[in-house]
Image (cartoon, rainbow, N blue to C red):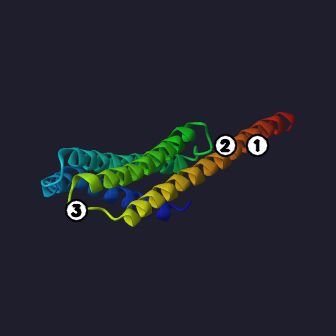
């Protein structure tokens, strides 16, 4: 991976992390007060889902940052990288669960907020989005399996190189 690509990705991650902090600190409270006519359970649920959703994106960003550091050092094909890939998989899975939780909250909002119902089709679309995000977690899991194969091959290559060095 080129130095320019790593630098560009780090810049994007840094901007995204700064923006996510703004969302958690400034925008989440504004949304809380904007929902003052909604029942307390719905307000709390959506606020918690929002903050945790942004936190899961932050976990993904930090894990990718750490993997970029490992790429720069040439140590990405090691068992230490699995910790960060597992972090990405867990955060994406948590994101899928939170998206589904939004659908659940929207479904129950239909029965608690007269005149402010959520269309059943929209609830279905939200469930579909949760399914797609869960699929992304599965794709990253497959990529983790490929990383495991690469780590094993790298270890075998180093072992064979050391045996060859002994012979020569």
Question: Label 2's element?
Answer: helix
Residue at position x 78%, y 40% from top? 161
Q: Which residue is mark 2?
A: 148
Q: Which residue is mark 3?
A: 116
For the C terminus, the quadrant is: top right
Residue at position x 50%, y 56% from top? 131
Q: Earlier in the sequence, mark 1 or mark 3?
A: 3
Residue 157 badge: 1
Residue 28 badge: none
On screen, 119 above or below 102? Answer: below
Callout 1–callout 3 Cβ contact below 8 Å: no
Image check: 166 left or right of 67? right
Residue 35 x %, y %: 16, 55
Residue 103 x %, y %: 37, 54
Q: Earlier in the sequence, mark 3 or mark 2?
A: 3
Badge 1 local density, few (<14 within 10 Å), some, or many (20+)? few
């Amino acid at each position: 991976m080129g130095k320019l690509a790593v630098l560009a990705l780090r810049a994007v991650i840094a901007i995204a992390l700064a923006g996510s902090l703004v969302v958690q600190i400034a925008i989440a409270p504004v949304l809380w007060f904007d929902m003052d006519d909604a029942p307390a359970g719905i307000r709390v649920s959506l606020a918690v889902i929002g903050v945790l959703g942004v936190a899961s994106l932050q976990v993904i960003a930090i894990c990718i940052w750490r993997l970029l550091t490992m790429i720069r050092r040439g140590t990405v094909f090691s068992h230490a990288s699995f910790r960060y890939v597992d972090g990405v998989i867990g955060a994406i899975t948590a994101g899928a669960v939170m998206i589904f939780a939004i659908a659940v909250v929207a479904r129950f909002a239909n029965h608690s907020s007269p005149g402010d119902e959520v269309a059943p089709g929209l609830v279905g679309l939200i469930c579909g989005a949760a399914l797609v995000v869960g699929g992304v977690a599965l794709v990253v899991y497959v990529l983790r399996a490929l990383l495991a194969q690469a780590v094993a091959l790298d270890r075998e290559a180093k072992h064979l190189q050391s045996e060859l060095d002994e012979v020569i």
